[in-house]
Image (cartoon, helix red, strand yellow):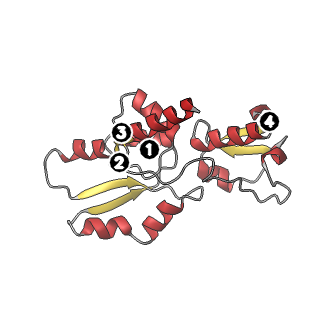
Amino acid sequence: MKLKKLLIGITILTLATASLAGCAKKNNGEKLSEINLTYVKSPLNVPSIIQKQDDLFGKEFKKDNIKVNFHEITTGPEQTQALAAGEIDFLHALGGTSALIAASNGVELKILNTYSRSPKGFMILTNNNSIKSAADLVGKKVAGPKGTILHQVLISALDKEGLSMDDVEFVNMGIPEASASSF
């Protein structure tokens, strides 16, 4: 339990370092005219969806004549790479694993806020009505991005049922491809 709390603390601390770092590097003391942030709409990323739909950032930053640009980058490694390259200023949704890996590789991260904690914020979605729990995934193909929070949640859900990744056929692919696939 202490290790879990420590990892959560490290994750929060690590994420706290990211968003502003890209902004500071890009700004160089000049008046900021635009910001670039990621938009992650899936899976069920309700805060991101509502924020963009209602243009919450756009309305707020418009007061200071700052344009908001959204970039749909759905995997943590791609998000942190874009941040490190100065292409993105804010990562709207980033999993703990990606944050820790990025920080260990020298990407400066700053957490501004958090809005979900796994596994309580996640669920299994399928068009197969016979799948009601992780136990029903035995022998089935399961698609998603390996090494992400979604992958961690899958491993945890299987573990709670006394199962492992060996009990499913995991297909490593991005969220959009996994959502569109039908095995």
Q: What residue lies at 62% left-to-right and 51% top-to-bottom?
A: 120
Q: How many marks?
A: 4
Q: Secondary structure at mark 1?
A: helix
- In the picture of the structure, the residue carrying the numbered disc 4 is 163
Can residue 173 be seen by looking at this rendering? no
Q: Are marks 2 and 1 in contact (CB under 8 Å)?
A: yes
Residue 74 in percent (x, y) is at 51, 49
Nearest-to-viewer mark from 1 and 4: 4
Q: Is residue 69 left or right of residue 182?
A: left
Residue 148 point in image, percent of width and height? 57, 40
Point out the frontmost of discs 1 and 3.
Answer: 3
Few, some or many C-alpha atoms within 10 Å of disc 3 (few <14, some 14-19, many ≥20)?
many
Q: Earlier in the sequence, mark 4 or mark 2?
A: 2
Q: Amino acid at mark 1?
A: Gln
Front residue of this view, candidates 93 and 179: 93
Quadrant location, the N terminus: top right
Q: Secondary structure at mark 2?
A: loop
Q: Residue 140's image quarter?
A: top right
Looking at numbered disc 4 in the image, what kind of residue is underneath it? Leu
Q: Earlier in the sequence, mark 2 or mark 1?
A: 1
User: Which amino acid type corresponds to the residue marked 2 in the rendered image?
Assistant: Ile
Q: Secondary structure at mark 4?
A: loop
Q: Which mark is residue 109?
A: 3
Which residue is labeled 2 in the image?
A: 88
* Spot occupied by residue 27 in the image (x, y as percentages of width and height): 19, 47
Circle nearer the viewer, 4 or 2: 4
| Residue at 40% in and 32% down | 103
Which sits in the foreground, 29 or 17?
A: 17
The amino acid at mark 3 is Leu
